[in-house]
Image (cartoon, helix red, strand yellow):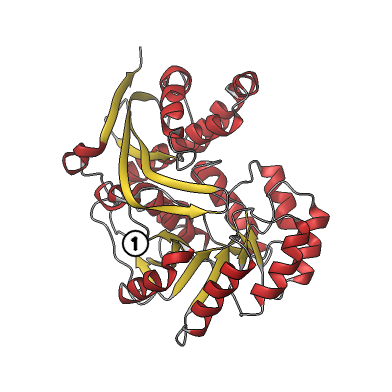
Amino acid sequence: MTLRIARIETFLYRAEVTEPVKTSFGSIPRRSALLLRVEDTEGAHGWGEVWCNFPPYSADNKLRLFETVIAPAALAGCYADAADAWHQLTARTARWAIQGGEPGPFAACIAGLDLALWDLTARRAGKPLRALLAGDGVRDTVPAYASGLNPDTAAAAVARCREAGFRAFKVKVAFGPEVDDAVVGGLARDLRDGERLMVDANQGWDLPEARRAVSRLGAHGLGWIEEPIPADRPAPEWAELAMLSPVPLAGGENVMGYEAFAALIGNGHHGVVQPDMLKWGGVTGAYAVGRRAVGAGRSYCPHWLGSGVGLLAAAQVLAAVGGPGLLEHDVMENPLREVLAQPFARVAAGSLPLPSGPGLGVEPNLDAAAPWLVTRLEHRSA
């Protein structure tokens, strides 16, 4: 099969929220989504999403990068399949990314396009994306956890999410020992049978702080401690924390490249591997990383904090990879999450049911999302 792209549409949405997502590196005061609709020369289509949750207006930069660089390059190519498109475009734009000093935005744009091409390919095959990746008989639900919980509203959020069907929860930390201890201790005491609690420091500690924090917070029996130190800190620092922590360390959302992930998995300091497929790699990269992680005895728990398109993509790949991993399900206020992925599945008894339809199994409701549309652009092949 030869894959040629005839048309690409980009949709930039932005919605204000009453409660920003609070992290140790800053807040996310509004929610943005940059969607791609890709159509091939035979009329098949697929949806993708580009990672853009931080900084607050990073979506605007990626929209213009896609318009002026990525879309023209993608429309000019001819590909054997979606994975071939990712490899070709990554190689073709490598020098441009260096020249522009923007390897991250380039990778995110190509990852979103990769997702759209995988969705398109699965739709053409009449299979859910998970079945296209792993074959028929793959599971049709994935365990999920409620993510993004702010420390000052965490108790109420856990109660709300518990009623909504969640059985695992992740709260933000690295706001100081007193705040962290009070929040984590209170949540841990209130857990019910079968429930799990995880924490995310968002790279918020230096090594001395992290030494103290992982021992102290890990004593609560957490599922994992995420990004206790910056992702680019050397392996010896991660090795030390992994030995000091009574619970697994997690990370990967801020890692890029096959070599980097191979080292992360091979070092064994991360018990939980969390690539963000729409920050780097798309389906092509995330599925490969996930299989390597599970094969090495780690948990593959894909990172995502965006709209429902990316959420369903992460869920489909997690189902295909298998293993004991959990799906990150952002539960903070975001008007774009559900409207851009219809029909939107609901968590029940701790798991998210996956659509039975082809591809991602969802379509954005563009009419309902119109109040949040900022920019819509169209790109066609010559």
Please count the marks in the image. 1
Between 256 and 76, the one lying in front of the other is: 256
Residue 198 seen in the figure: yes
Please, which residue is most extreme toward the front here?
178
Between 165 and 22, the one lying in front of the other is: 22
Please, which residue is most extreme toward the bottom here?
193
Q: Position of residue 339 (x, y in %)?
A: 24, 49
Q: Which residue bears the numbered disc 1? A: 354
Q: Position of residue 126 (x, y in %)?
A: 31, 48
Please, which residue is most extreme toward the top here?
382
| Viewport quadrant of the C terminus | top left
Between 179 and 59, the one lying in front of the other is: 179
**311 lies above or below 64:** below
Q: Where is residue 66 in the image (x, y as percent from the top left)?
A: 44, 25
The quadrant where residue 364 appears:
top left
Q: Position of residue 120 (x, y in %)?
A: 35, 39
Relative to 291, is 160 on the left or the right?
Answer: left
Residue name at image x 36 percent, y 66 percent: 352
User: The residue under label 1 is which amino acid type?
Assistant: Leu
Residue name at image x 58 percent, y 60 percent: 175
Relative to 182, is 66 on the left or the right?
Answer: left
